[in-house]
Amino acid sequence: MINQTMKKLGEERSVIRELFEYGNRRKAEIGAEKVFDFSLGNPSVPAPACVQEEIGRLLREVPAEVLHGYTSAPGDPAVREAVATYISAAFGAPMSASYVYMTCGAAASLTVALNALCNPGDEVVVLTPCFPEYLVFIGQAGAKTVEVPTNGAFHLDLPALERAIGRRTKAVVVNSPNNPTGAVYGEEEMRALGGLLLRKSAENGAPVYLLADEPYRELSYGAPPVYPMNVYGNTLVLYSFSKSLSLAGERIGYIAVSPQCADADGVFAAVCGAGRSLGFVCAPSLFQRAVSACLGKSCDVELYRKNRDLLLSGLTACGFSCIPPEGAFYLFVKSPEPDAKAFCERAKKYELLLVPSDSFGTEGYVRISYCVARSVIERSLPAFGALAKEYGL
């Protein structure tokens, strides 16, 4: 018999992906300009010029058998060195290339890190609302997910976290700027989290790791997010260039194990072992080299800010309620009826594709991804207005 868990995952795709595929069908049926697809976090802002320039240079100057050949399993040594140097210089966090592992994006980073750390029966704390695939990745690693709601402003609820972290807790996953809420955790609350994890590690007699999921780091509209390694030693940063460089389809990122981790060498060896066992070795060679020349660069984040402001003001004018996001490219909007799924189904009547918050571990909200062309937002506002009238907003 085949693996029934895997069969079920294959048959029941994520709500986000289902909406995306539904949107593709509707675009084919009625025309793309008539469908307002806010389902997928697929960047619309072009990659910065350095990406194309570096790819062109590599294709011209590096022999094909080198450029398209295997790198070392954890990544090209020069790329790992460049990443470590950048982390040290940009964030003041001492880093060595020997603790950098190149990956196929943040999903691979999360999967590898969880398998490196977790033993069967361990618990991993996630903060809800959260990216739904966390639960899939944690389960695949043989661990149990413990969901802890954030507070009313979608920031850390430290008392709730303290109650949730127990003897079996192996890690806490933090995502800031956050998908789906756009919250950016401030330095004070992150330092408080670091202090909490330090105390809990002492109580447990074993580290409670902080897994910092960082694909949206550069997409912040205020003060830059605090660097997690600077507030807590037992940290693994799980980074992706998908959003910062608009390279979602190229699947390139890295794991950075803090040198301050207890037994950092052992943790990195476990990362290498997990990558080996899962087949996540030798991340794409061309894009390893390309991103190493673009460290610290980003797409034009101001375009996302303008999209946020246009959509936020438009929805607020219609009567919808939303806490203004501090980063990423999502609005988390209060559903005008308790059943967010029903609200999203009604929105389809106006060709509005919105993701119900049930997928993220929270009821009563919808996620609207505004990493779309500005024209999509402009054309969608009358549809949102018509939808709002149905609810008497």
Image: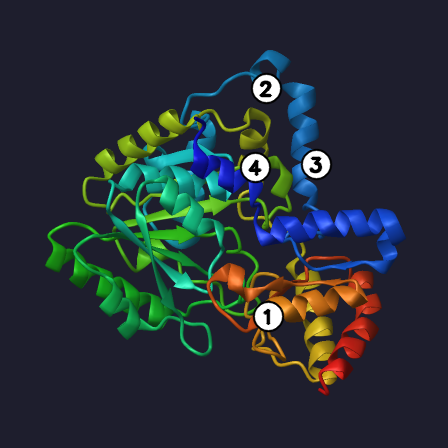
**Mark 4 crowd level (few <14, some 14–19, many ≥20, 10 Å Cα):** some
Say which residue label 4 marks.
251
Task: Name which of mark 3 and mark 2 comes first in the sequence.
Answer: 3
Q: For this rendering, which residue is in front, 225 or 319?
A: 319
Residue 186 seen in this snapshot: yes
The amino acid at mark 2 is Leu
Q: For this rendering, which residue is in front, 183 or 68?
A: 183
Say which residue label 2 marks.
67
Q: Which mark is residue 331?
A: none
Residue 140: image location, x then y, percent: 38, 40
**Mark 3 crowd level (few <14, some 14–19, many ≥20, 10 Å Cα):** few
The amino acid at mark 3 is Gln
Indicate the quadrant where residue 62 lies: top right
Say which residue label 3 marks.
52
CA gap between label 1 and label 2 equals 48 Å
Task: Name which of mark 1 and mark 2 comes first in the sequence.
Answer: 2
CA gap between label 4 and label 2 equals 17 Å
The amino acid at mark 4 is Arg
Task: Name which of mark 4 and mark 1 comes first in the sequence.
Answer: 4
Instruction: Identify the residue at the far front of this view.
Output: 1
Q: Judge from the rendering whether residue 326 lies leftward or rightward of residue 113; answer left or right.
A: right
Residue 266: image location, x then y, percent: 22, 34
Q: Secondary structure at mark 4?
A: loop
CA gap between label 4 and label 3 equals 16 Å
Say which residue label 1 marks.
340
Q: For this rendering, which residue is in front, 363 or 92?
A: 363
Q: Measuring 24% from the left and 46% from the top, which residue is drawn there?
A: 121
CA gap between label 3 and label 2 equals 15 Å
